[in-house]
Amino acid sequence: MHPVLNGLLFGLLLCVLIGPVFFALIQNSIEKGFWSGFFMAIGVALSDIFYIVITYFGVSQLVESENFKMWLGGVGGVIMLVFGLFYLFKSVPKTTVMKNTNGSKDGFKQILKGFFLNGVNPFVLFFWIGIMSKVSIDFEYTSNQAFGFFAALVGTVFIVDVLKSHFATKLREIVTARFMRIMNRTVGVALILFALRLLNFLLEGFGIELFA
């Protein structure tokens, strides 16, 4: 599949992850307006780019080693498997309460808020390590292809985040407990399937194959 199309699909997958950033973005947009949410979405995207750069250069230097690829597949697979199981069985609250707060409309402040809200979560780094494992040893993308993949992925997430800001009030009504359970299970199943593909690289090193 074309790297840009793959990036689009992975971006859409990330968009349905319902976590703290999702609700913070909606809350921010409802309380302070569309542009506040827009600048916050910029901060989230910059945070993702930061982690992508770190993980890409950390992985690309060693990916030529078959032994490294084998263990990277194992580590990435385990990370994705844990995330998949977490979202598959994650419980959700019956209601989501958004507190009313007063804050500045300063765009730079909202960018920083989005950057650090997304960046301080250690699970974000682990998740990008899993994605990078997929790109490096499963898709085997060149540098240009990887750039296209991640540009499409981050661009998709950013555009959807902007749309979330625009439709914040309606989204607040739509995101029910049932909706969250469906999205979590959908994401969980998808991540588990990706994890099994990555774990196959580790098992192949021991003469075991999950996939022909």
Image: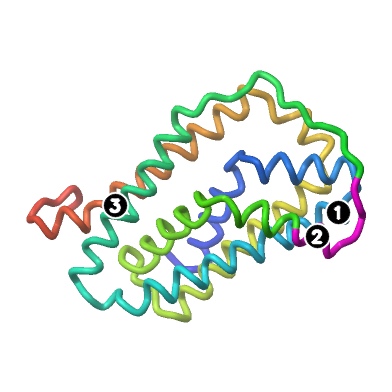
Judged by its main secondary structure, the magenta piece is: helix
Membership of 100 in magenta stretch = no
Find residue 95 and report its horizontal and vertical position in percent. 70, 21
Q: Looking at the picture, which amino acid does disc 2 mark?
A: Phe
Q: Residues within 10 Å of mark 1 (few under 14, many from 20)?
A: many
- Position of 55 with respect to 27 (left or right) is left
From which residue to which does the magenta span run? 103-112
Q: Residue at x 86, y 54 (%)?
A: 36
Q: Looking at the picture, which amino acid does disc 1 mark?
A: Ser
Membership of 107 in magenta stretch = yes
Residue beneath disc 1:
36
Farthest residue in the left direction? 207
**Splitting the image into 4 quarters, where does residue 108 fall?**
bottom right
Identify which residue, 209 or 102, lies in the foreground.
102
Q: CA distance from mark 1 to mark 3?
A: 40 Å
Q: What secondary structure is found at the residue carrying circle 3?
A: helix
Q: Residue at x 88, y 38 (%)?
A: 101
Residue beneath disc 2:
39
| Quadrant of the frame with the N terminus | bottom left
Q: Is residue 156 above or below residue 147?
A: above
Pointer 2 with pointer 3, Cβ within 8 A? no
Q: Looking at the picture, which amino acid does disc 3 mark?
A: Arg
Residue beneath disc 3:
197
